[in-house]
Image (spheres, rainbow, N blue to C red):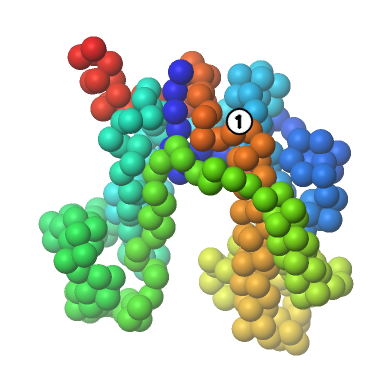
Amino acid sequence: MAFLTKYNLSQLSQKLEINVDVSLEMFLQHIYNDPEIYSILNKREVEYLFKYKMLLEDEETFAIEYYNEVPEKEDTKSYVFNKGGKMKYHLSPSCKLITKDYLDFNIPDEIKSIGDAAVQEYREWFNSNKFGDRFRSKEIDKNTIIALFNTKYPKKYGINPIEDNSNLLVIEQPNSTIRTVAHSYDSEKNKRELNKLKYDWQRNFPCRVTKTMAKFKHLLTKTDDEIKAKISELFSSVFIENYGMEKLKYKFQLSKELTNGIITLILDHIKWTYDINDKRFDNKTLEKFGLECCLSCLKEAKNN
């Protein structure tokens, strides 16, 4: 049997492709018995929750009934350290890599837009300065990296500097562990918190237009021109002119915060229901999904 860190379980739930559209009926049966939540979430979010739940309940049945394929991760040139390759599973919950924090750094869009050579040069500059190790040991902070970036790259490539305290470079640092939920769970408290988030969402997105707008919160990562093009396609060419770009971005951000809160609470419900802390996965099924055993676990297995 095998173990997945909470980070890789989340990544797997995002990457796996399924052969069905998750309908309202499937959502109510498999995920959470609340049609209002289904209407709030977009298709990608609903699929994520479905895959997460099905993997915890029975990954072998999921593979037979719903699995389509998972491509090997390609290098998106988005991060300093993550260059694609297969995700890993572990043979033991005591593997030292399970408790190792995940840390990576974004490659700024301006660098990516210049081309692969600039991305490679940026990665080499980052590694030669040992920014990852120095950041982890708290020898430097993100503003030190930003300052050194601004000294080098705006002048070299004619791009904009990064503002102090920006979170543009450093990305999430989830604690990679298989332990993800507390030893107790208050379902009534969970429901109360869900109801509050649902109320806040409905209050801020009361009509068809705002509800549609809320589903496109991913546009926050796009340029103003890309946002304008999509919103013009959805509504009209003068929508942003009348509504305002900053007001629109505020709505995107609010929708993101509220739906992220809802998803977190639903995940807490799923994790507790299917006892994620004691979940053992089938090795062969994980390999079918495109994962491979971590090298540390393989080495340990050979030595025993």
The residue drawn where x is 65% and y is 28% is: 57
Residue located beneath label 1 in the image: 55
Q: Is residue 300 left or right of residue 286?
A: left
Residue placed most toward the observer, 281 or 151: 281
Q: Quadrant of residue 171?
A: bottom left
Horizontal and vertical percent position of residue 290: 47, 26
If the image is split into quadrants, where does the C terminus sit? top left
Residue placed most toward the observer, 107 or 205: 205
The residue drawn where x is 23% and y is 77% is: 147
Q: Quadrant of residue 108?
A: bottom left
Q: Is residue 301 left or right of residue 209?
A: left
Relative to residue 223, is residue 185 depicted above or below?
Answer: above
Relative to residue 224, is residue 90 depicted above or below?
Answer: above
Horizontal and vertical percent position of residue 22: 77, 39
Residue placed most toward the observer, 123 or 146: 146
The residue drawn where x is 45% and y is 32% is: 4
The residue drawn where x is 19% and y is 78% is: 151
Q: Is residue 213 left or right of residue 168?
A: right
Relative to residue 277, is residue 140 depicted above or below?
Answer: below
Horizontal and vertical percent position of residue 2: 44, 23
Q: Is residue 287 among what the camera can see?
A: no
Residue placed most toward the observer, 71 or 258: 258
Relative to residue 302, is residue 205 depicted above or below?
Answer: below
> Dot 1: few (<14), some (14–19), or many (≥20) neighbours within 10 Å?
many
Check disc 1 and report its element: helix, strand or loop: helix
